[in-house]
Image (cartoon, rainbow, N blue to C red):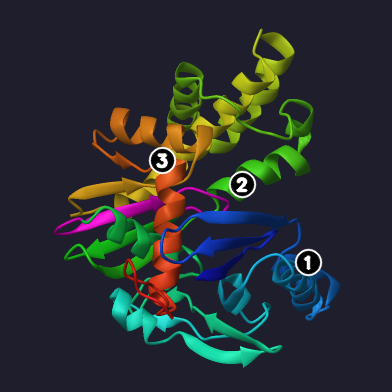
Amino acid sequence: MNVIVIDGGTTNTRLRVVDAETLEVKKRISLDQGVRNQAMEQDFSLLERLIDNELDTLAAQFTFRDVIGYGMLTANIGMREVPHAPSPLTMEELAAQTVHERYNARRWHWITGMKNGDEPVDVMRGEEVEAFGMLRHTPAEGSGLIILPGSHTKYIRVEDGSRLLSCTSTLAGETLSALRTSTILSDSIGPKLVEALEPEVLMEGWDLAETEGFTRAAYYVRLRHLFADYTENARANLLLGAVLYEDMKAFEHAADGAGWLYLGGHGAMQEAYRHVLEQKQGRPVHVFTKHDLEKASLQGALQLANLEQTKGESR
């Protein structure tokens, strides 16, 4: 059985045609528009039109009955608002909040996000699918923390190896992007930001933020451009180190009492988080590969939509 899994983000939307039994991804489509475009243009049917068009095209190539929508698709500026479910939450409790309905002549399953049930207030949409999938892919015991680097880095506290207790969000990725696009640092850092990890320069940025403050450390990026032989990638590493110094303050708060650590993300950003967690925080961390993380996310989406199949089962 094929299922269409759609992850709606702030700036992009991903569609995947997935075999529900094997989790094989038969086709991937990435749209460079997300809920931010709807909000900016005040056109709240934009994504619906784009996604319906893609689904019509896919229907000519694949047989499918079900569509899973999650992430920002279920936000108030998405396609179909579904209120956040309050934590703490098990996978079964969140699955009970999934909305199943006919939508534009197709069978949709809308997975909602999570909000902290207690102080401090925080929310997430999409990361809960990934988190539950990671716990299913690689079971854990006791209290721990799932770290998902990104535009909005999420620190997700887990108890009993299965229940999401709370989340802590930061603007780590967006801070990097904003400093590159909206300040004088745009002359010093390229659009791809960190393409490869340079640990020594990363730690230089960390140390500068620790001793002289974040804004001063950020300005060193320009100074290294003007007066030192630093490549564009090295300068981006310097800035990332400063950002991570600040981000680890949120980590320390979220990780208090946590035993194990799971790390998602990908590429140089994932490597950077791993480096500072091990070298500066002294914490061993289980790192998910890009392949395992995708499998985990798909597992989470299928189970939360109540569409997961056991081998040989038909629908």
> Looking at the picture, which amino acid does disc 3 mark?
Thr
> Looking at the picture, which amino acid does disc 1 mark?
Asn
Query: Magenta segment range?
Result: 140-153
Q: Whole-percent x and y of residue 37?
A: 78, 66
Locate residue 95 relative to residue 17 in the image: left or right: left
Residue placed most toward the observer, 210 or 298:
298
Q: Please indicate, yes or no, whether residue 123 appears anywhere in the rendered image.
A: yes
Locate residue 9 relative to residue 158 in the image: left or right: right
Q: Are marks 3 and 2 in contact (CB under 8 Å)?
A: no
Q: CA distance from mark 1 to mark 2?
A: 20 Å
At 74% from the left edge and 69% from the top edge, which residue is drawn? 60
Q: Please indicate, yes or no, whether residue 168 appears anywhere in the rendered image.
A: no
Tag 1 secondary structure? helix
In magenta segment, residue 118: no
Q: Earlier in the sequence, mark 3 or mark 2?
A: 2
The label number, if any, that marks residue 175 in the structure image: 2
For label 3, the residue is 289
The label number, if any, that marks residue 304 in the structure image: none
- Quarter of the rendering containing residue 75: bottom right
Tag 2 secondary structure? helix
Q: Is residue 65 placed above or below 36 in the rendered structure?
A: below
Q: Whole-percent x and y of residue 304?
A: 40, 75
- Quarter of the rendering containing residue 283: top left
Residue placed most toward the observer, 108 or 277:
108
For label 1, the residue is 37
